[in-house]
Image (cartoon, rainbow, N blue to C red):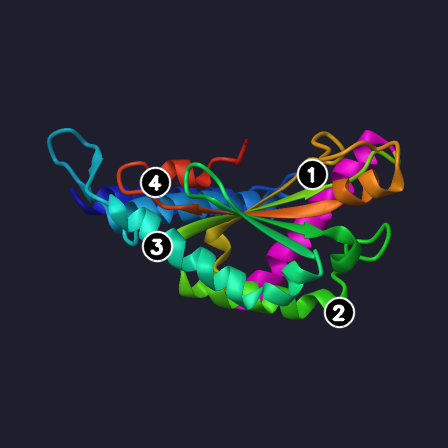
Amino acid sequence: MKSKPLILALLFLLFLSACTTNDPHQRAKTGAAIGAVVGAVAGHQMNDKSGKFVGAAVGALAGAAIGNYMDDQQREFEESLAAEQERHDVEIERLKDDTLKLSVNNEVSFAFDSADISPAFKPTLGKLARLLNKYNKTVVHIIGHTDNRGSNEYNETLSSRRADHVAFYLEDRDVPGARIRTEGRGESEPRATNATEAGRQLNRRVEVYVKPIVEGDEETAYESPRY
């Protein structure tokens, strides 16, 4: 009986891998789905009577361990990225559900109208990758944003490409793709007015949300962050 969920999961993964689509972000979406399925199969056992998964996922956090784990991770983020914070290139924020939010200024991370990561930003991403690998009981959401110059469609595509390029860079430094989700929200969530250059600069950004995997509620870590 315990082999059935594994077989079903593997068939599901093969189906996802074989699908072709016009969605340019299918790779990231498939990786997230694979992560959710593999986590469930690897971390749970099948209840023969109910046919449902039971038990905690491998690496999930519970109780006071959640806050302590995210406390340690936040402290190391702040220490490692102290220079970036001092330059106002990166902001680190702790949200009410223990998620860590890193806001990255696009002016230092990407050239104008480009999804290519700036060489000057790569050392920062290297630090981030190292810490994400160290604190691996999390799911990483990378969200791209733009100002309102250009069409909605163009801005959404550009923000998605930038988020994807950050994800690819992290994966190249051994952060598992199954832990990463990407999304482009274009100009839909401005931080400031688009009527001034200072406001537009704040709106051009990439946000990285690091969500803890909580025992008994593992799927929430994979849900798109909305705050």
The residue lying at 31 percent from left, 44 percent from top is 40
Give the prevailing secondary structure in the magenta stretch. helix
Residue that carries the numbered disc 3 in the rendered image: 69
Give neighbour class at mark 1: few <14, some 14-19, many 20+ (Cα, 10 Å).
Answer: few
The residue lying at 88 percent from left, 41 percent from top is 197
- Mark with earlier residue (1, 4): 1
Residue 2: give x, y in percent of width and height. 18, 45
Q: Which residues are magenta?
A: 151-174
| Amino acid type shown at disc 1 | Asn
Distance in Å between CA atoms under marks 2 and 3? 31 Å
- Mark with earlier residue (4, 2): 2
Label 1 secondary element: loop
Residue that carries the numbered disc 2 in the rendered image: 119
Q: Which mark is residue 218?
A: 4
Numbered label tally: 4
Q: Is residue 136 visible?
A: no
| Amino acid type shown at disc 2 | Pro
Residue that carries the numbered disc 1 in the rendered image: 22
